[in-house]
Amino acid sequence: MGALDIAVVLFTRDLRMHDNPALATATAGAERVVPLFVVDVHLGSAHASSANRAAFLVDCLTDLRESLRGAGADLVIRHGDPVHEAVKLARGTNAGVIHLAEDVSAYAAQRLDRLRRAAGRERIEVHAHPGVTVVPPGEVAPSIGDHFKVFTPYHRAWQHRRWRKLAARPRKLVLPGGIAAGRLPSASSIAKGTTSPQLPRGGEHEARKQYQAWRQRGLTGYADSHDDIAGDATSRLSPYLHFGCVSPLELARDAGDRQGGEPFVRQLCWRDFHHQVVAAFPAMGRDDYRSRGDCWRTDDEELRAWKEGHTGYPIVDAGMRQLAAEGWMHNRARLITSSFLVKDLYLDWRLGAEHFFDLLVDGDVANNNGNWQWVAGTGNDTRPNRVFNPLRQAERFDPVGEYVRRYVPELAGVKGGAVHRPWDLPDDERHELHYPDRIVDHGEATARFRSARA
């Protein structure tokens, strides 16, 4: 039997069976396939450097193993350096090729480069495949420059790009004999810490069930409802997209042909946009994409109040408390809370990005840091001094205060829109709430920010 009759598939951010080009190509080209996931001991996994993502990852791996077993194979688990373990397994099984999904972060690019060099020394081929985004970053480029810096022209080019065909889900897989599959890791062995109490369950089956249910109830009205914070009408698929439990291309193809699908597909395009920016600027996680000469303030008490949801601005505090409770936050609330940190408090966006990354199940460099830099004005926003007024945002997107009362129980007894202005309540009533005063006046804070950016 020739070397190419056995293939290793190194799963990374593509933890699914449907539309997985790496898995489908390996299955089509080899008689036997070794599905592999390596728990990266240096990172606590490339996905899971937080307790929330670690727990979600274990769900994903459990689900993927069940699916692979149902197809006749198994998920082989190893611990260590993904490059070393993949090459070692390929060499031990006499595999002639390693397949994996191509990703955009600096870590992923370095991993792929190291894998190619290490496998090359063993005369093992390495094939990288699309699958993390709808359109691979390098396939949509401007006539001048290596990537789009503004979303609107990117979106136009992205819409006219011919998308690849969906990869078939393998029905039958054959695993070479004599391979110890290995035990699934525990979440605590990957990352320390306490998980959010309302964390969603991970896995491909959960992802597909979530999409099917939301498509029936939420897709048609998505354009009008996706900013309704209290309505909670978004798909909540971002954690599943981050871990590759569902294919972004499959979602785009399915939703794009349905009533109301275009605005949802546009959000998938935003995700692709941030990925192509990170592919071109790998330092997005730590360096300003466009420096504005900021001399950020330092205030540990204000930062702590923001993290804990005790700023005195109910809409901001509700968002931060949702993040702590669920490991997820509504996108409109992300804009409001992040703008408050960098524009009202004038604290470094990296502090906010780090806190979000600690808790978000969908946290990754492209989307988390890309959006933080967009809000901070150091990224791809064409209006870098844009400020989200927390009160106006609250009155527009949570007009009767349902979202605030859901996550800020101290204010549950305040009726209607008055919940957004607790400082206007009579003194005796306000003191009985046991809710903090505003840590900053929005008007004064905005003036301070504009002066700093002048």
Image (cartoon, grey):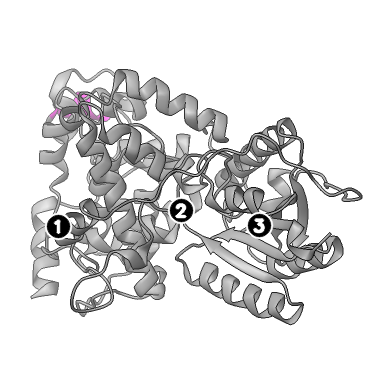
State which quadrant residue 64 falls in: top right
- Secondary structure beneath dot 2 equals loop
Residue 382 x/y as whole percent: 12, 64
Q: Quadrant of the C terminus?
A: bottom left
Residue 107 x/y as whole percent: 53, 70
Residue assigned mark 3? 10
Q: Dot 1, how many residues are within 10 Å of its Cα: few (below 14), some (14-19), or many (20+)?
A: few
Identify the mark nearer the N-term, 3 or 2.
3
Identify the mark nearer the N-term, 1 or 3.
3
The image's mark for residue 262 is: none
Q: Amino acid at mark 1?
A: Thr
Alpha carbon separation for disc pair 1 and 3? 35 Å
Alpha carbon separation for disc pair 2 and 1? 21 Å
CB atoms of marks 3 and 2 within 8 Å: no
**Looking at the image, which is closer to me, 381 or 144?**
144
**Residue 54 against residue 345 in the figure, above or below:** above
Q: Is residue 40 in the magenta section?
A: no
Q: Amino acid at mark 2?
A: Val
Looking at this rendering, what residue extends furthest in the front direction?
1
**Residue 149 against residue 329 in the figure, above or below:** below
Q: Which residues are magenta?
A: 425-431
